[in-house]
Each structure stands twice: as C-alpha cells, then as structure tokens.
Amino acid sequence: MSVLRAGEAALKLVPELGGAIAGWTVGGRPVFRAENPAASVSREHACYPLFPYSNRVANRRFRFDGITYELPDLMNGWAIHGAAWRCPWVLDGHRMVLDYKGGELWPFAFQAEQIFELGERSLSVTLRLTNRHGGAAPAAIGLHPFFHRTEQTRLQLKAGRVWMADENKIPTHAEPLPPAWDFSTERALDDLEIDHCLSDWDGQMRLVWPERGEALRMSASRNLCHLVFYCPKRQSFVAIEPVSNRTDGLNHMDDSTDHGMARLAPGEVLQGRIDMVLEPL
C-alpha cells in the first residue's frame, strides 16, 4: 500500500490488488467508505477501476467483428466489471498502470492508466485506455467508488432514464426514472434500494453529510454519460459509478446508439476524467 498526501488529505492506493483505492480521508474523515484491512480483492476496497467495460455481460458472451467471445465467471456467475480489477497494477508516483497482454479475462490487449491529482479537499482521477491489440477492439472505462454514507446522507443527481433489468440483472429496456429513484432535487437516501444503470446523466452529483457540514460535488467528462447507482438498504456506503458504457453495452454495439462502447483502432486512446471536491455547507 502507498499513500499520497496533500495537507490533511490522504489517499491510500493498493496497486497490487486490482489498482484499488483503500481509502480517501480528509482531516481523518472518510469520503469513500471505511478502509477494509481484510480486503482480498479490489471490490472489497473503497474504489476500483473498470476497464475495458463496466458491470455485467449477458451470458458471459459477446460478438465483435463476426467472432463470438466467451468471458469467465468473475463474481457469482457473472462476467462483470472488466479485467483490470482482477490484475496487479504498477504504481509510478501519482500514476497507476496496467499492461494487459490479452488472455482469459479479456481477449484484447490494452494498457490502462489511472492518474490521481490529490488536493487538500479534492481528488481528480483521469482514466485512460490504449488499445494494444493488433486490430480493432471494443473498449469502455469507468470508476467504482463506494462513498461514505450515514443515516443523514442526502443526494442530488439528474438522469433521464433507468435501465430495467431481468432476474440476472441484465437490462431489458429503458424507462423514465420513477419518483422513488428521482434525485433531481436533493433528498435523503432513507431506505432506498437500487442496483441499476442510469442513462442521460448530466455528469453531476452532489452528496451531502449534514452532520459534518460538508458536501461532495462530483463531475465527470461528457463521455462518462452513464451512471451505475448501487444503494443497498442499511449499508454504510452508496456506490455511484461514472461509466462510459451502459450495462451489457458490449452486446448492443450493432443495434443501439447509446451502448457507450468505443471501437478503438490499434494505438487509439479512450480517456475520461472524474473530479471530486469537498465543499462546506
């Protein structure tokens, strides 16, 4: 584990465990969920990267340029969250790098980068994926932060639609957000339970901790226009994940315009950025 510091801010990085962030604190107060010393995989930490796709792939299978590819079971029978969270990364100062050669986790070679800019009350993460395959390859990027959550935590974000899913959590169709999931006006999370992908997200999110007198404002680059919203009941975290692809976008590159997957030529780069700033109330 390595620690980046800026004033009272500390960012703990675990490159060897899927390029994860173990914790982000400011003045000793957690912004991401509390550290987990027992974590054995990156998804048990506070934040981890999503390369070269986010969330689930239906039947662990997709077709690209006439070839059908099979993906492995990465969690509970799913092909989920790409390959990078299952691989060791290398830390170079404020930059973590993964050179993936292609293999069982994902058939196409790529280089993934996370570049961290830590301020006294801010954190910016640049995500960059370079196609190292010999031909074209599908690609997407995203970040999976688990934010600190209390009984008083309030949320504001604006999205147009939600992808409704089947029993395997694979989207079937999009609908306007129902009132229970509409946070366009700031309100408490209460007993909300959701694990869905939102589309037409405006790239802004505000999370408020009234008891701390603080709020976190997150903004994402325009190509990260989907948002995975995971809020289980009575947990000490909420996951709000800026991503470029909608869930199972890999299987809809030929029949949809909002799949969010990029088609990268050899050497081509896909890049996005997430900025997070703590503000006083």
Image (cartoon, rainbow, N blue to C red):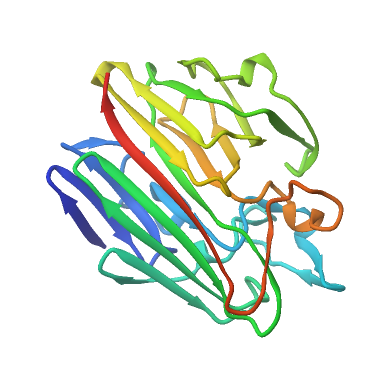
Percent position (x, y) of residue 212?
24, 21
Percent position (x, y) of residue 89?
40, 71
Lateral position of residue 55 relative to residue 57, left or right: left
Percent position (x, y) of residue 267?
58, 78
Above or below, 149 relative to 1: above
Above or below, 4 relative to 180: below
Dividing the picture into quadrants, the one containing residue 207 is: top left
Q: How many marks?
A: 0
Quick one: quadrant of the N terminus? bottom left
Residue at left offset 22%, top offset 46%: 119
The answer to whether one can see residue 36 in this image is no
Residue lying at the far left of the rendered structure: 7
Residue at left offset 61%, top offset 53%: 54
Q: Nearer the viewer, residue 260 or 190?
A: 260
Dividing the picture into quadrants, the one containing residue 168 is: top right
Quick one: quadrant of the C terminus? top left
Lateral position of residue 151 relative to residue 176, left or right: left
Dividing the picture into quadrants, the one containing residue 7 is: top left
Lateral position of residue 234 relative to residue 169, left or right: left
